[in-house]
Each structure stands twice: as structure tokens, then as C-alpha cells.
Amino acid sequence: MRRARLDQAAMVLSGVCMVHCIASVAGLFAIGLLASFGAVDEIFHRAMLALIVPVSVLAIVAGYRRHRRLSVLLPGLAALTGLCLMAVFEEALHGVWEPLLTTLVGIGLIATHFGNIRACKVCEGAHEDIRPA
């Protein structure tokens, strides 16, 4: 069950990151105001990256070891790669591209973690059918 908690935590972190990016552009929420303070905004981005990547990698790999579905593993790794590339090329992506790409990557990560949870539940259900009574 610890693996599912990692997936859930990664989904929440990805969601917070998406809300921040969208709010920064729209100027709607207090978390979006961090964009007004360059250093604070940079710290927020680095902190989110430092949290999302390891939690996601742990959850995705643990899930893959259980269900062995490349259809869950590969999109997750692609989304994480995209997130890291966005961090490297952050300066070039300012404007509309950053929130758009962050939203797409965030949706990809959330979908991956949701798929990871579902695939593990299916796998666990299959194992229960095999166990002797």
C-alpha cells in the first residue's frame, strides 16, 4: 500500500505545480503571486522539481516492478524527462509555453500515476485469484 501513497503524493505535487503555473499566468491565486518575486519563484520551481522527480520515480518503478506494463512506465519516464528538460530550458520557455508545457507534463504524470495505481490493483487482484484457499 506504500507504493499507492507514493503515486498519490506525486499526483498532488504535479497538481500543485500545474496550479502554480496556470495561476502565475492568470494572476488568480496567491501561489501565482510567487512569480512576482523572482528568487522565491525560482526556489519554488527547484523545490517542486526536487520533490516530484524522486517521488514519481520511486512510485513508477515500484509499480512497474509489480505490474510490468511498459504502457505505464514509458509515458511516465517521458513526462519526467520533459519536466527535467523544461527546468533546464526554463528561460527559453517563459511566456505561454511554460504553463502550457507544464500543464501537459503534469497531466501526463497524473495519468501515469493513476494508471500505475490501476495496473497494480489489477495485478493484485490476479494474484489473489491464484492463491490457495
Image (tube, rainbow, N blue to C red):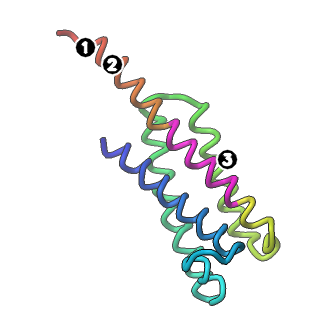
- Cβ–Cβ below 8 Å for labels 1 and 2? yes
Q: Which residue is mark 3?
A: 78
Q: Residues within 10 Å of mark 3 (few under 14, many from 20)?
A: some
Q: Which residue is mark 1?
A: 131
Q: Is residue 73 left or right of residue 124?
A: right
The part of the chain drawn in magenta is 102-115
Where is residue 84 shown, x and y percent of the image?
A: 66, 62
* Viewer-nearest residue: 15 or 51: 15
User: Of the residues shown, which amino acid type is indicated by label 3?
Assistant: Ala
Q: Which residue is mark 2?
A: 127
Secondary structure that dominates the magenta span: helix
Give how far apart the Cα atoms at labels 2 and 3 are: 29 Å
Where is residue 39 shown, x and y percent of the image?
A: 61, 89
Q: Residue at x 45, y 50 (%)?
A: 58
Considering the image in quadrants, where does the N terminus appear? top left
Where is residue 60 shown, x and y percent of the image?
A: 49, 44
Q: Residues within 10 Å of mark 2 (few under 14, many from 20)?
A: few
